[in-house]
Amino acid sequence: MAEKIKTEKQKETKKTPQKSVKGFYHYIKEAWKKPSEGMIYEIRKKMIDWRAEERIHHIEKPTRLDRARALGYKAKKGFVIFRVTLERGGRKKPRPRTKRRSKRFSIKKVLRMNYQWIAERRVQKKHPSLEILNSYKLGKDGRFYFFEVIAVDPQMPEIKSDPTINWICSPKNRKRAFRGLTSSAKRARGLRSRSHELKVRPSLRAWDRQGR
């Protein structure tokens, strides 16, 4: 009898496992993954305003808070957000005028850089005192791509004293966008996967540009 009473008490004391509670950022992410008709309508209305802005426009807060926080953004001094508008279409090399044979006069598309990497480079060129941390895509319409670029001011004391981000203050991490060290640049360079067939390490230059 005593053993039965103990087993009954143990069954009573056992608690059913609670379901994991999902946070606010999870629901923001899901809303952007599968936007409703009302959200699509609002985004299209915003795109009309974005097209009228400057091509590199400074904003106070990120539009996609979930992506910005996942990529290292913090709501503190030293972090800057830019919305970049890029025109869609082929990026071609300028046609050479002289000293080429006819076969080499062609205008080829430049496919080694993705649009996101170009957006980061343009922000870096316009604001040389800032360092590019990361970027993410907002959307596109029939003519433009829209990106938001997260930049960091390495001279701010709030950045230097933060152990999670002060690595960007090192001289080794200067001009990251131009050197292809951002996430989108590494994706364009083919550094997301490792293979002996991909001659991209240590660099394309080391393989006489015979990589991907």
Image (cartoon, rainbow, N blue to C red):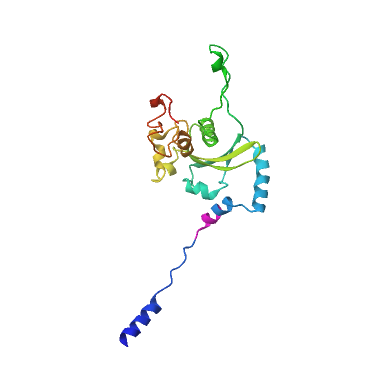
Q: Residue at x 50, y 58 (%)?
A: 23
Q: Quadrant of residue 36?
A: bottom right
What kind of secondary structure does the magenta stretch mostly adopt? helix
| Residue 48: % across, % down | 68, 41
Q: Residue furthest bottom?
A: 1
| Residue 11: % across, % down | 39, 78
| Residue 93: % across, % down | 56, 23
Image quarter of the C terminus: top left
Q: Residue furthest top?
A: 99
Q: Residue at x 43, y 26 (%)?
A: 210
Q: Is residue 107 above or below residue 183?
A: above
40 relative to 188 in the view: left or right:
right
| Residue 124: % across, % down | 51, 33
**Start-end of magenta stretch:** 22-28
Residue 152 visible? The answer is no
- In the image, 121 versus 160, the foreground residue is 121
Q: Is residue 148 above or below residue 128?
A: below
Is-magenta flag for residue 24? yes
Image quarter of the N terminus: bottom left
167 relative to 114 in the view: left or right:
left
Q: Is residue 74 above or below residue 124?
A: below
Is-magenta flag for residue 123? no
